Amino acid sequence: MNAALELAIVIPVFNERANVPVLIDKLDAALKGRAWEAIFVDDDSPDGTADAARELARIDSRVRVIQRIGRRGLSTACIEGMCATAAPMVAIIDGDLQHDETLLPKMLDALEDDAALDLVIGSRFMEGGGTGEWDRDRVAKSAFATRLSRQVLKADLSDPMSGFFMIRSRIVRNLVPRLSGIGFKILLDIMTASPKPLRFTELPYVFRTREQGQSKLDHVVALEYLIALYDRMFGRIVPVRFAMFSVIGALGAVVHLSVVATLFLLAGMTFVAATIIAAVSAMTFNFFLNNALTYRDRRLKGARELIDGWISFCIVCSVGVIANVGVASFSHNVENGGWAFSSLLGIVVAAVWNFALSSRFTWGR
Ligand code: GDD
Ligand code: MN
């Protein structure tokens, strides 16, 4: 019989084909004498990362591959990988070789030697750690993000933005229902999800420079970080998708009014014609913005999906308008705080309707 499995290393990957075999070699060298498995979680990368990982998995039974199709997201990839192992400990490490895999045995020893410890975090911001060749801009952005994280994180962590850590897998499984899974910051998600503070220790490492492939950290990821913070602070009161849908809806109302003003007031079109064009413009604007932001993790792509989605969104919203008018005029008849209250009620009902039905029919899978 083989030695009992000690550790799973979950590796989220997107377009990291060239790095896959190198990382397995490095893990093999770093974890000599330990019983480990590596789980690549790929989001159907166009460069064939999953194929490269499967090629290795066929000859090395320690290597496993999860290929997710139709979904994207670093945090959710990590969560799925962490739930897919029988090992008692699970580590997250980037697939681009920027994290220092030689820290893994030390992390494992720390957890195995101290049953009271929940997780070990790799830190770039403590004695012995570093960010390597980061430019001033990235250092400043990281520091700002760290400061923001203090709004939700009570623990005194030197590197809450770290994506490199090891945790008992049982703890993760118990926390899954509370995780938001939004964006890049899975560690912050886990630390802030736990009802009782997790007991952690930090070990220093130097963040390496990426040699192959490109970082996926872009403006959307930065926005996702803010969304994740919102979710932790207010998500229970107003769910984050509904909040985004509503804000975009309000922008849509501005588009509607501007188009009516332009076509009716300036261009002299009839009010009805101007209103119809305005409504279609606003719905189209809302459809694309929601597709890019609110439902970015299950974004519709390609002409076919986009056209079908747009049509179903327009149908849902048209019914929403009818609901809006119906509720507003009904509540106005039965005497209450006046027209403003009735209008607002109509808008809220229509927003909830549009949100509920479009998330089911336009972006539902
Ligand atoms: N499955 C999957 N899906 N993997 C992804 C996705 C995704 O949508 N986006 C990124 N990845 C993978 C990348 O392929 C890489 O292996 C890893 O996640 C990190 O992504 P990078 O794009 O290289 O991010 P970074 O280097 O800017 O930031 C990383 O390191 C920081 C320092 O530890 C992230 O891990 C940050 O969370 C971390 O703070
Ligand atoms: Mn990276």
Image: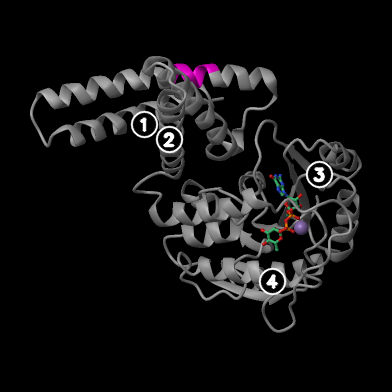
The three-letter code of the residue at mark 3 reads Asn
The three-letter code of the residue at mark 1 reads Ala
Distance from disc 1 to disc 3, alpha carbons, whole Å, reads: 38 Å
In this rendering, which labeled residue sits more in front, label 3 or label 4? 4
- Asked if disc 1 and disc 2 are in contact, CB closer than 8 Å, the reply is yes
Residue at 41% x, 57% y is 233
> In this orientation, which residue lies closer to the viewer: 236 or 330?
330
Mark 3 or mark 4, earlier in chain: 3
Q: Secondary structure at mark 3?
A: loop
| Disc 1: CA contacts within 10 A as few (<14), some (14-19) or many (>=20) | many
On whether ligand 1 comes within 8 Å of the CB at mark 2, the answer is no
The three-letter code of the residue at mark 2 reads Gly
Q: Secondary structure at mark 4?
A: helix
Distance from disc 4 to disc 2, alpha carbons, whole Å, reads: 35 Å
Query: Is 86 one of the magenta-colored residues?
Result: no
On whether ligand 1 comes within 8 Å of the CB at mark 3, the answer is yes
The part of the image, by quadrant, that contains residue 316 is: top left
Boundaries of the magenta span: 311-316
User: Which residue is denoted by mark 1 in the rendering?
Assistant: 351
Residue at 46% x, 24% y is 263
